[in-house]
Image (tube, rainbow, N blue to C red):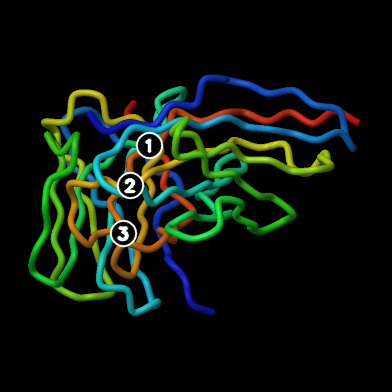
Amino acid sequence: AQSVAQPEDQVNVAEGNPLTVKCTYSVSGNPYLFWYVQYPNRGLQFLLKYITGDNLVKGSYGFEAEFNKSQTSFHLKKPSALVSDSALYFCAVRDGRSGNTGKLIFGQGTTLQVKP
Amino acid sequence: DGGITQSPKYLFRKEGQNVTLSCEQNLNHDAMYWYRQDPGQGLRLIYYSQIVNDFQKGDIAEGYSVSREKKESFPLTVTSAQKNPTAFYLCASSIGPGELFFGEGSRLTVL
């Protein structure tokens, strides 16, 4: 079965500290992986994606993610958290059964709380 | 500016009424999608369309209908058959298998 898991409902971190939001996946074929961020009552904003190439992917607002094929993980990281990073984060994987579409399977989301 | 416009942002419906949510994009994307968001459940796919005049059911299509008469437009109708329609609805578009671009969402509340 194709799926995405975000094992933590909430992550708390102090401003200036590094942050990690975890994601693991299960998909047939080569994974296309994505991270999105959502602020309250807003749509999702694209942060970064992995399709092929380097396992460390750099994205918007200083975020990066590390693809680990053996552990089927795609954790989101940032070296120094900001209070303004507080939001809901979604990991997603392209549905391998969907051919050439952008049809995605989303995790349930992780709330990131950065405290001053 | 290019983007996706959803309207209305907030909508209230009485039980038994159909409502239609609008989604318009000027990104020239072929594919469009409707997702439903409920607290703690992530996003679930309702319908998607890869080209004009064609669309496919997603994981939770029951009680919903769509049309794709123009490339730019992908309206979603929430029918009276949808048993629990109160949710946040998100429209998105993409070029092929690339990232999705989302609208700002429509929040539907059933009174």
State the residue at coordinates (33%, 40%): A105
State the residue at coordinates (28%, 74%): B72
Crowdedness of circle 1 by 10 Å Cα count: few (<14), some, many (20+)?
A: many
Q: CA distance from mark 3 to mark 1?
A: 18 Å
The chain containing the residue under callout 3 comes to B
State the residue at coordinates (13%, 35%): B63
Q: Which mark is residue B22?
A: 3
For disc 1, the marked residue is B43
Q: Amino acid at mark 1?
A: Leu
Query: Does A46 sit above or below residue A105?
Result: below
The local secondary structure at tag 3 comes to strand
**Where does the image place residue B109, in percent across and percent down from the top left?**
37, 32
Q: Which mark is residue B23?
A: none
Q: Determine if marks 3 and 2 fall on one subunit.
A: no
Q: Amino acid at mark 3?
A: Ser
Query: Does B50 sit above or below residue B102?
Result: below
Q: Nearer the viewer, residue B97 or B104?
A: B97
For disc 2, the marked residue is A104
Q: CB under 8 Å between callouts 1 and 2?
A: yes
Q: Quadrant of the N terminus of chain A?
A: top left
Q: CA distance from mark 3 to mark 2?
A: 21 Å
Q: Amino acid at mark 2?
A: Leu
Crowdedness of circle 3 by 10 Å Cα count: few (<14), some, many (20+)?
A: some
The chain containing the residue under callout 1 comes to B
Q: Quadrant of residue B110?
A: top left
